[in-house]
Image: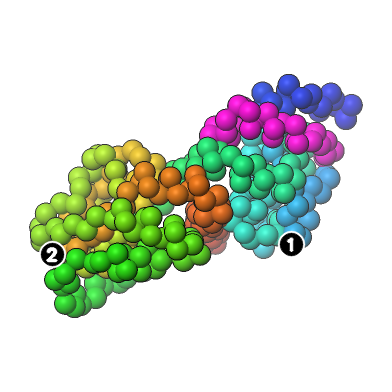
Amino acid sequence: MSRTRHLLGPLERLLFLRSMESLAGLPPEENAKLALVAKDRFFPRGTTICEGGVQVNSVFLIVEGTVRISWDDRTLDVGPTDGLNWLRLLSGRGTSRRAVALEDVIALEIRATDLLDLYEDSPEFLEGSIREYTRAILTMRGPLPITELTELPPLGDEPTEPLDLIGKIGIVSNAGSVWQQAGMDTLVTIAQHLEEVRIPKGELLWRLGDPAHAPNWIRYGHVRCTDAEGNHVDIAAPYGLGFFDAMLGETRGHHAVALTDVVVLQWDMGTIFGVLELMPLTALRLLRLVTEGLSGLFDLQASKEDQAKSA
């Protein structure tokens, strides 16, 4: 690549951003805003684009060229349409990894503050990003839920009375850090739309391929999840089951059958997305949680690759 190569003009920046799958959820007017704040950067071969362990102040989108990212004893080469620091910023990890241009590189630089402002100002972009990273998690981990249980715990006493509003608010607030930090109005709104359902032993919660309308918070009981290849995972209350499928609004990736009598609370996705649209800080917390999970999966994958090389 010539060191005097013409960099991207405003229209070229806009067209490049529109071509990126990671920005597919961005409305045209917001895409134009992003193109305006993005700056052309040229990094000659051998240039250090990011030092490792420093605060993330900018993210980079690679237009041309190859970049080597390194951390610990690992390396990863990335190229056009890949990003640098994007997940590090959104997941709240805060510090960059060392990135060096393996050849002449053209990139778009976006200040972290501009990107976060855009997320806060554009509910469509925020929700689209949550769905995109959720899809990436499902692709990497597979359709089955993840649990640390090695064996199912004793059942305890089955609840005989349905939860009142206060009890449902407690369920929502304990369902994860996103909701623990939400305001009482948000908790009440979601709790009011929770539907409690009792499922007898042996009955299906859903079949593989069924529409994924709602996530289920398992209040009581044991559930077996089985994928298309016959692999299965057993889970126990309390557990949030099917949230990722429902977030995408597509189909179930596995069967789910009640191993015991089961009591679940079904969340209304319309209410959740309505809350996220009205409460951008809550939506940003959810985006952070999802990107934390995705970053963790990338790290786990890299660790497994290292182990395979040394075996």
Q: Where is residue 136 in the image (x, y as percent from the top left)?
A: 47, 45
Q: Tag 2, which secondary structure?
A: loop
Identify residue for label 2. 261
Q: Tag 1, which secondary structure?
A: loop
Distance of label 1 from label 2 (alpha carbons)? 50 Å
Q: Residues within 10 Å of mark 1 (few under 14, many from 20)?
A: few
Q: Where is residue 261 in the image (x, y as percent from the top left)?
A: 13, 64
Residue displayed at 14% across by 58% down? 199
Identify residue for label 1. 53
**Which range of residues does the magenta coloring cover?**
18-45
Work out whether residue 231 can be spotted.
no
Of 227 and 114, the residue lying toward us: 114
Residue displayed at 26% across by 48% down? 254
Residue displayed at 19% across by 66% down? 162
Residue type highlighted by circle 2:
Asp
Residue displayed at 11% across by 54% down? 203
Q: In which quarter of the image is residue 274?
A: top left
Residue type highlighted by circle 1:
Gly
Please say whether residue 27 is one of the residues in the magenta stretch.
yes
